[in-house]
Image: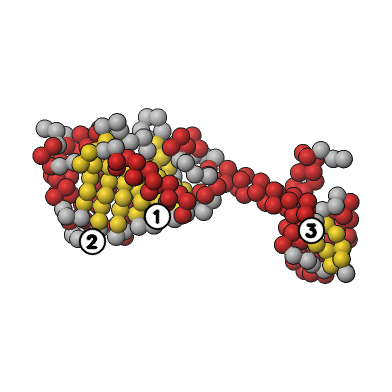
Amino acid sequence: MESALEEIEFLALSSNRVEVLRLLAERRHTRTELAEATGASQATLGRILGDFEERSWIRREDGEYVATATGRLVADGFTDLQEILEIEGTLRDIVDYLPTHAMDFDLRRLSDATITVPSATRPNAPLGRLLGILREADTVRAFSHTFNEQTLGVVREQVVGDDQRFKGVFGRTAIDALADESELRRQLEALLDADEAEIRVREEGVPIAVMVADETVYVLLRDENGVLRASVDTADDAVRSWAEDSLDHYWRTATPLESETLSD
């Protein structure tokens, strides 16, 4: 009997093997149908089907082939492994910046996420993508350790213009940094005075930077020095549920921010 690693290698070394097993795990196929679906020659298919039958992964019935229960198990497991490795490859360059300690969802939910990283020609690409999303959103909810000038400016413009509803909770340091600069303080006060804005401050801080713009969850990723390294955005339901639950937690443990309570 082959070892598990040898069986994985057996499948992985041939895309035709992987595809044939996947097809037969879905439904019955004739040999001709398999050839049309995979483009494999009859000789290649003969070897593949023979190898699979030896392993009891498939059986032949009335001129058709179909996966057995263990064949379906192998097909499903190999598909899961492929998906895991594909998402790992997508996240590999940013994994060091992901706040996984606070991300209570399966990382596979990020398989369709858009990852934006700075480049030599677009050093502010992650923030630029966020600002573009914010300008189009009807509702924005946020929990973050930062509230930078550009983001504040867009949110204030949209909310004061009655084009957006905003709800956010920020760490004390983020609010104090805005209050320390007169122009940014005026923008923050204008936002606080708007009917469509609610802001709270959390004295314990907020460990991550997340915004939910309508249905899209947007996460800004920074390194240990606070340098923006990437952004991740997705409309995945599970990620949005996590973001909404996290916002509820931070909101409950924060206090309302009023203009008169801003530090001098």
Q: Closer to the observer: label 3 or label 1?
A: 3
Report the number of discs.
3
CB under 8 Å between discs 1 and 2 = no
Q: Quadrant of the C terminus?
A: top left
Question: Which residue is at 41% across, 33% downward?
Answer: 223
Decide which of tag 3 and tag 1 comes sooner along the chain: 3
Q: What element carries label 3?
A: strand
Label 1: few (<14), some or many (≥20) within 10 Å?
some
Question: Which residue is at 21% across, 51% downward?
Answer: 197
Q: Quadrant of the N terminus?
A: top right
The type of residue carrying mark 3 is Ala
Q: Name the spot of residue 132 as percent of width and height, x first.
A: 33, 55
Q: Can residue 48 be seen in this view?
A: no
Q: What element carries label 2?
A: loop
Label 3: few (<14), some or many (≥20) within 10 Å?
many
Q: Which residue position holds label 1?
A: 216
Decide which of tag 1 and tag 2 comes sooner along the chain: 2
Question: Which residue is at 78% across, 66% downward?
Answer: 28
Q: Which residue position holds label 3?
A: 67
Determine whether, in the image, residue 105 is placed left or right of residue 38: left
Determine whether, in the image, residue 143 is placed left or right of residue 53: left
Decide which of tag 2 and tag 3 comes sooner along the chain: 3
The type of residue carrying mark 2 is Asp
Q: Which residue position holds label 2?
A: 163
Label 2: few (<14), some or many (≥20) within 10 Å?
some
Spatial separation of the CA atoms under disc 1 and disc 2: 17 Å
Q: Is residue 227 above or below residue 155?
A: above
- Asked where in the image residue 227 lies, by quadrant, the reply is top left
Spatial separation of the CA atoms under disc 3 and disc 1: 39 Å
